[in-house]
Amino acid sequence: MANFLTGSPGSLKQVNRFTPQQQGLQNQGIQQLMQLLQGGYGSKPDISGFAPIAQQARTQFQQQTIPSIASRFEGMGAYGGGDYNRFVAQAAKGLDESLASQGAQFGQQQQGLQQNLLQLLLGLGTQPSFENIYQQGQPGALQPLLGGIGKGLGGYLGSGGNPLAGLMGLLSGFGGGQ
């Protein structure tokens, strides 16, 4: 009842800037950031994800490339000789060099992705989760009446104590007149 009569003052209200899902993603990101930092980020790129790619290339070399080379040398009647062995060794060396180069590129891409993730997570981590909003106060039922009495009293006092002028000022204060 007191708020109805006297009103309520303005106040600051703190509201969450993110949905629960966004907060969850932010928390996950911060955990990943911490893991990156604890794992010695930047020391050596992790290329373990490249291992299946390299294994597939080696299997393909064994199952397709070597038989293809063998059939060409068989057609020339030189299968199993020194030239054949040198050619297979040279092809294997080329495969290893190619895989080493691709592995290095893969590592650089992984490092670039980690850097992008790190920057994104740092950006998210530095954003405030809450925002302060000012909620304007609400006038109560007595405030206009008290304001009118104040205006009227001011008018009365400003009239030099003239009772009729003071009464007119008091009444204009109640009516909200200027």
Image: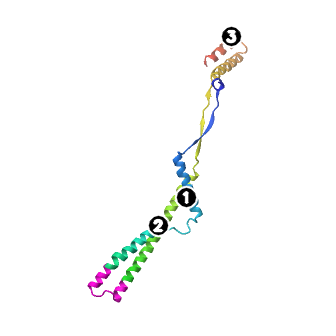
| Residue annotated with mark 1 | 32
Q: Residue at x 39, y 72 (%)?
A: 57
Quadrant for the C terminus, please.
top right
Q: Name which residue lies at 34% across and 77% down.
A: 65
Indicate yes or no whether the magenta region holds residue 110: no
Relative to 157, say whether 75 is above or below: below
Membership of 82 in magenta stretch: yes
Report which residue position mark 2 lands on.
49
| Label 2 to label 3: alpha-carbon separation | 95 Å
Q: Percent position (x, y) of residue 167?
A: 68, 12
Callout 2 environment at 10 Å: few (<14), some (14 to 19), or many (20+)? few
Number of residues whose C-alpha sits closer than 10 Å to that of mark 1, classed few (under 14), some (14–19) or many (20 or more): some
Q: Quadrant of residue 42?
A: bottom right
Q: Mark 3 touching mark 1, by CB under 8 A?
A: no
Mark 2 or mark 3: name the one nearer the start of the chain: 2
Query: Residue 125, position in %: x, y?
Result: 57, 53
User: Could you tell me residue 18's position as x and y percent?
Assistant: 54, 45
Disc number lying in front (3 or 1): 1
Helix, strand or loop under label 3: helix
Report the span colored magenta. Answer: 68-87
CA–CA distance in space, label 3 to label 1: 79 Å
Q: Are marks 2 and 1 in contact (CB under 8 Å)?
A: no
Q: Which mark is residue 164?
A: 3
